[in-house]
């Protein structure tokens, strides 16, 4: 008789065990993107919604990343650029495919010329519909390639986070700049096992970029500084990009070197610092025996290098090897991080018995006399009671209005050229302008970025009426997100920078072709959108109106009617008309 085996409770298989399986954790492409952004330190994206990209929003909600939605994709891209500038962290904009991406091109191009690290993520039609004519399908990567440091398409969901980290790595290589990624809709929406996706860990996928330059070149620059009788230094954008304020100040103070500043370098030395100079720059460049250019290319703003004395020893320090010596021969070029380089130079100069500082007092006095003469010559116009209002009076009042905590933004042509001569930020990182692309329309998005990043700082923006017209509808976004600022419109109902060139070139009878705007009451525009607005027709009204805007606690526009028949000296000397 055959034996039978009884199954005891101890060795019995659970009921239905054969049917049980372990399902691996799944993650979507949009969530992988958000995880990679979080690893990069991105805490905010600027966006305009579209069906191609909404899974990124879902990921951002889970990762605690703020989503600021705007009314035009150009604004999103400019805001990402501005956010990178004010925070030192990379900015990010997310837009849909086709027109969403093409609308953002101007913002990306501006960041490219301004050396601002940002990532634009654009949607794309599904890979399964490749070349079939899907909605909003365009060759985005081909279009973005010339104006970015990196442009690619994400080919598979597993690669989404990996390519985001790659894009940021490229954005920070050498002189920073923008990157672009397009993500097809089915790649973004698909879900893959978490273990199959590479999600780079924060702090483990990028090397330090703080190169201090060639040690021999550092020693040579130190020797040049120690023996120079009439040195000067220009502190440009990269001084702020590299957060080199302390090392720059230390160097110029210990060696008694007069300092000029441009772009985001403004504010490195406060306006009351005895080594801060502005109006004597031409005299310094014509008469110095040593000129050090830090983080500024020899582009149109520098007369392509021709504004520097041919007799001077010229040293250029830059993050980008390609920029050093471009357009003008130099005596010494150093490629490296401005903070590391200037700190190393200061160290190399220390401990010397005579660093030349005492012997430069006469040179400093000479420059101060030139500075004072130029200021006194212009002062009557800054205090003018003329009506229509002289733009010099307007920018003078703005300069007097700024506090130690005011971030100043210039968005315009002729009116902002006036302000560049007069307005002095009180601290580093408190000046923002579009940069060498000369893009109008950056004001509203830069305000958005600065006020969101630093809600306790005051943001003051001077607009030309033409510039505000380009992105002004996103004033409503500032109202919606409760981002108060003080806005001033220098309103002459004209594109006056271009108008001057046309009059100069073709005569006064053709000076109003294609450059004249309507008389827009921007104060009422602000009120309509829920902000504070006020009109100003007389110089005495400017300061009280600015104060009322400050006290309103709202996004504001003070509409100042300025004289359309006067032009900034910089406008009259523009190289485009030569």
Image (tube, rainbow, N blue to C red):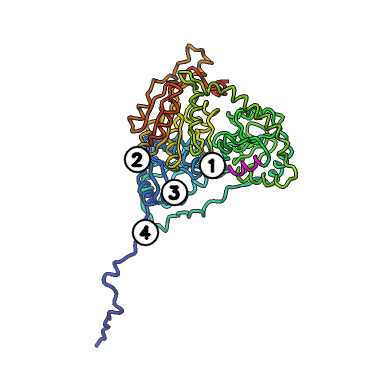
Instruction: Report, in whole angstroms, how far the alpha carbon at label 2 lies from the one at label 1.
Output: 28 Å
Q: Which mark is residue 54?
A: none
**On the rendered image, what quadrant is the C terminus found in?**
top right
Instruction: Report, in whole angstroms, how far the alpha carbon at label 2 lies from the one at label 3.
Output: 19 Å
Q: Which mark is residue 25?
A: 4
Horizontal and vertical percent for residue 566? 50, 18
User: What residue would you read off at disc 2?
Assistant: 50
Task: Identify the secondary structure beneath mark 3.
Answer: helix
x 68%, y 40%: residue: 255
Report if residue 139 is visible in the image. Answer: no
Horizontal and vertical percent for residue 404? 51, 38
Residue positioned most to the top: 509
User: Around disc 3, counting alpha carbons within 10 Å, would you say few (fewer than 14), some (14 to 19), or many (20 or more)?
Assistant: many
User: What residue would you read off at disc 1?
Assistant: 176
Q: Observer-nearest residue: 23 or 531?
A: 531
- The magenta segment is 244-253
Task: Identify the secondary structure beneath mark 4.
Answer: loop
Q: Of helix, strand and loop, which mostly describes the magenta segment?
A: helix
Q: Are marks 4 and 1 in contact (CB under 8 Å)?
A: no
Q: Depth-wise, is mark 2 or mark 3 nearer the camera?
A: 3
**On the rendered image, what quadrant is the N terminus found in?**
bottom left
- Asked whether 250 falls inside the magenta stretch, the response is yes
Q: First in sequence: mark 2 or mark 1?
A: 2
x 40%, y 48%: residue: 65
User: Around disc 2, counting alpha carbons within 10 Å, would you say few (fewer than 14), some (14 to 19), or many (20 or more)?
Assistant: some
Horizontal and vertical percent for residue 242? 56, 43
Q: Depth-wise, is mark 2 or mark 1 nearer the camera?
A: 1
């Amino acid at each position: 008789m055959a034996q039978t085996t009884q199954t005891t409770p101890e060795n019995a298989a659970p009921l239905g065990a054969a049917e049980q399986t372990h399902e691996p954790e799944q993650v979507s492409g949009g969530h992988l993107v958000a995880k990679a952004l979080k690893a990069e330190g991105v805490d905010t994206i600027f966006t305009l919604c579209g069906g191609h990209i909404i899974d990124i929003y879902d990921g951002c909600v889970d990762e605690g990343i703020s989503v600021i939605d705007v009314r035009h994709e150009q604004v999103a891209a400019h805001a990402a650029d501005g956010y990178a500038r004010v925070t030192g962290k990379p900015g990010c904009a997310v837009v849909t495919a086709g027109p969403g991406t093409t609308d953002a091109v101007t913002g990306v191009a501006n960041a490219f010329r301004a050396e601002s690290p940002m990532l634009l993520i654009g949607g794309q039609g599904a890979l399964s519909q490749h070349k079939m004519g899907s909605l909003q399908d365009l060759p985005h990567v081909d279009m973005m390639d010339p104006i970015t440091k990196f442009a690619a398409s994400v080919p598979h969901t597993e690669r989404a986070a990996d390519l985001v980290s790659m894009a940021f790595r490229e954005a920070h290589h050498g002189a920073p700049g923008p990157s672009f990624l397009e993500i097809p809709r089915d790649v973004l929406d698909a879900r893959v096992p978490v273990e199959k996706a590479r999600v780079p860990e924060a702090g483990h996928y990028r090397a330090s970029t703080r190169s201090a330059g060639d040690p021999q070149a550092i020693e040579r620059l130190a020797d040049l500084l120690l023996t120079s009788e009439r040195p000067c230094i220009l502190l440009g954008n990269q001084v702020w990009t590299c957060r080199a304020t302390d090392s720059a100040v230390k160097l110029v103070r210990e060696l008694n070197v007069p300092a000029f500043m441009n772009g985001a370098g403004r504010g490195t030395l406060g306006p009351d610092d005895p080594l801060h100079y502005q109006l004597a720059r031409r005299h310094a460049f014509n008469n110095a025996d040593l000129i050090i250019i830090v983080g500024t290319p020899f582009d149109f703003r520098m007369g392509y290098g021709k504004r520097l004395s041919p007799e001077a020893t010229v040293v250029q320090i830059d993050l980008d090897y390609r920029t050093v010596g471009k357009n003008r021969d130099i005596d010494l070029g150093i490629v490296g991080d401005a903070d590391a380089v200037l700190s190393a130079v200061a160290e190399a100069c220390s401990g010397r018995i005579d660093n030349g500082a005492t012997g430069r007092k006469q040179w400093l006095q000479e420059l101060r006399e030139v500075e004072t003469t130029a200021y006194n010559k212009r002062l009557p116009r800054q205090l003018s009671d003329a009506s229509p209002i002289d733009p010099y009076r307007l920018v003078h009042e703005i300069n007097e209005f700024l506090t130690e905590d005011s971030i100043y933004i210039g968005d315009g042509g002729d009116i902002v050229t006036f302000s560049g001569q007069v307005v002095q930020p009180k601290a580093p990182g408190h000046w923002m302008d579009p940069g060498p692309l000369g893009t109008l329309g950056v004001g509203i998005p830069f305000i958005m970025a600065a006020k969101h990043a630093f809600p306790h700082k005051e943001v003051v923006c001077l607009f030309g009426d033409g510039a505000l017209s380009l992105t002004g509808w996103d004033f409503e976004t500032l109202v919606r997100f409760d981002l108060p600022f003080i806005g001033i419109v220098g309103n002459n109902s004209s594109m006056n920078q271009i108008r001057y060139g046309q009059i100069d070139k073709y005569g006064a009878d053709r000076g109003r072709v294609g450059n004249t705007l309507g008389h827009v009451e921007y104060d009422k525009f602000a009120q309509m959108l829920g902000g504070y607005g006020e009109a100003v027709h007389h110089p005495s009204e400017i300061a009280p109106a600015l104060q009322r805007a400050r006290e309103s606690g709202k996004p504001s526009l003070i509409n100042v009617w300025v004289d359309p028949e006067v032009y900034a000296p910089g406008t009259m000397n523009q190289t485009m008309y030569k």
